[in-house]
Structure formats: C-alpha cells, structure tokens
Image (tube, rainbow, N blue to C red):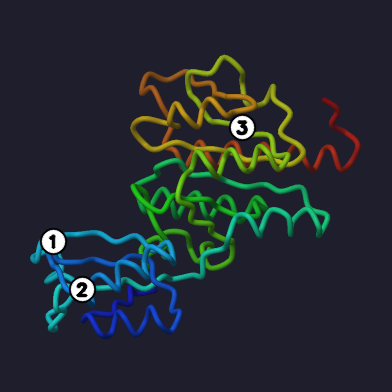
Amino acid sequence: MIKEKIIFGIHSVQEALDAGQEIDKIYLRRGIVSEEIRTIKSAARRLRIPVMEVPQERLNRFTRGAHQGCVAVMAQVSYTRLEMLVPHLYEEGFEPLIVVLDGITDTRNFGAIARSAECAGAHALVIPERGSVSVTADAVNASAGALMRIPVCRVPSIVGAVGYLKDSGLSVVVANEKASQRYYETNLTGPLALVLGNEHEGVSEQVARLSSVQVAIPQRGTIGSLNVSVAGGILLFEVLRQQELRDKNEYHY
C-alpha cells in the first residue's frame, strides 16, 4: 500500500522547490502573506504546480507539526511533457494512443481508467492541472500500480492539449452517451486521442467541438449511463481489438 508523502513548513517547501523535487500540489493557509510565500507562489507558477489556499483546519489534517501555513504534497510520479512525448512516439514508429481525462474527479475512477489504459497499450494519460484528480497515493493504489507504468501528462488546459493532439495528427474521439454513432461502427485505428468526460457532466462543450468523431456505447437498461471507468475500458479494448485485426490484415474500414 503506497502512502502519501508530505513536506510541511515554509523553508522545507522552498528547499524542495529549489531542489527540483516532484511536487503534486501546494496548500497554503488562506490569507497568508509574506515574502517567502510570494517566492513559493512564483516558483510554483514557473513549475506549473497548483497552489490551493485552504482554511487552517485543512492544513491541520495533513500534519500535527508546525506547518507555518504551508504544506506540499509530493508527486507519486514524474509528470511527462505532452509536447515532448508525442513527437518521440512518432519518431519511435508508434501510432500514439493518448487517453485524455476532462475533469475526472473520482480517484477510484482515475485508477481504474489508468489500469485499463496500461493494459490496452495506451501511451499516456492527460489530466488538467486544476479541477481534476492527480497522481496521489490513493490513485496509484486504485490503479493497482498502473500509474507507475504509464506516463501521465499534466497540462494547463485540456482544450489546449486536445487542440495540440489534433494538430499533431491524432484523431480525437470523444465519448458521448448521446452521440448517434456507435463506437464499434467507428474506425479506431491509427493515431488516436480518446477523451473521457467527468462523472456528472461529460466532456466539456469546448473540448467536444474539437472532436473528430463522437461515439456512444449502446445501452438497454434504464440507469442512463455507464461509470466512466467502465466506458473507458470498453472503448480502449475496442481500440486494441481493431488494431490487432488490422495488423492481421483482417480489419478494413
């Protein structure tokens, strides 16, 4: 069982930043102001580390120590730059398969999606810096360790990331339960970005506008929608199925 590692105290967090340690998030006491805090915020902006201002009680839950209004949660993995990964995949002769998570907030769903993605041969997961899950100890445990094996790219904007992937030659396939096209009627071979939306609202309208195609998984029950991790697994293994048939010259679209 992997446990979360934290660093607390202004000077300890500053030293971790200066040393280039992988930090997932920084939590500051709401309203705290000092030259040291300004320096921490500036470094976090430069390194694209989210900074959250929270009540004192939230910080006290992290540690009983003298946190001085500043706690850093260490990253469980080193995040990968999307702009470096995609060209590298092409150079190595791969057809990129990237799974983009648009606002997924449930850690267990994140872990389950990561596990399916790794098993299906996806090359990376993309998550936003804010308003989403991150690679915490709970997420790694929920993924059965898959998050230690598959690259994770954390980006400032999912819209920007999807636009970049589309410009890089990937077909953008958006999962949408209201789409008229069935997933198994869709060519899912070739360079592909599979976009999964959050548990309540689905993929954002801005991201959906960038789609090459939107696909649905047919249902006959009355509940109305599948869990996002289940939907992700179905779509990922349809990608794998089509790829294997194509490689055997048995799939022609």
Question: Counting residues from the N terminus, which is met first, the one under dot 2 or under dot 3?
Answer: 2
Q: Is residue 111 above or below residue 19?
A: above
Disc 3 secondary structure class: strand
**Residue at the outermost front position:** 35
- Out of 31 and 158, give the one closest to the viewer: 31
Q: Which percent across, then down, holds residue 91?
A: 81, 57
Location of the N terminus by quadrant is bottom left
What residue is shown with label 2?
A: 70
- Disc 3 crowd, CA 10 A, few/some/many (<14, 14-19, 20+): many
Residue, x 14% and y 66% (percent of image)?
A: 29
Amino acid under disc 1: Arg
Residue 78 seen in the current view = yes
Q: SS for tag 2?
A: strand
C-alpha gap between disc 1 and disc 3: 40 Å
Query: Residue 97 at what x, y percent from top left?
Result: 67, 47
| Amino acid on which disc 2 is placed | Cys
Specify whether 67 is left or right of 116. left
Disc on res. 173: 3
- Tell me the quadrant of the picture where the C terminus can be found: top right
- Dot 1 falls on a residue whose secondary structure is loop
Q: CA distance from mark 2 to mark 1?
A: 10 Å
Which residue is depicted at the point 40% across and 60% down? 139
Q: Is residue 92 above or below residue 249?
A: below
- Amino acid type, label 3: Val
**Residue 16 in the image, given as x and y percentages of width and height:** 37, 82
N-term mark: 2 or 1: 1
Marker disc for residue 30: 1
Q: Is residue 111 above or below residue 44?
A: above
- Determine the CA span between mark 2 and mark 3: 40 Å
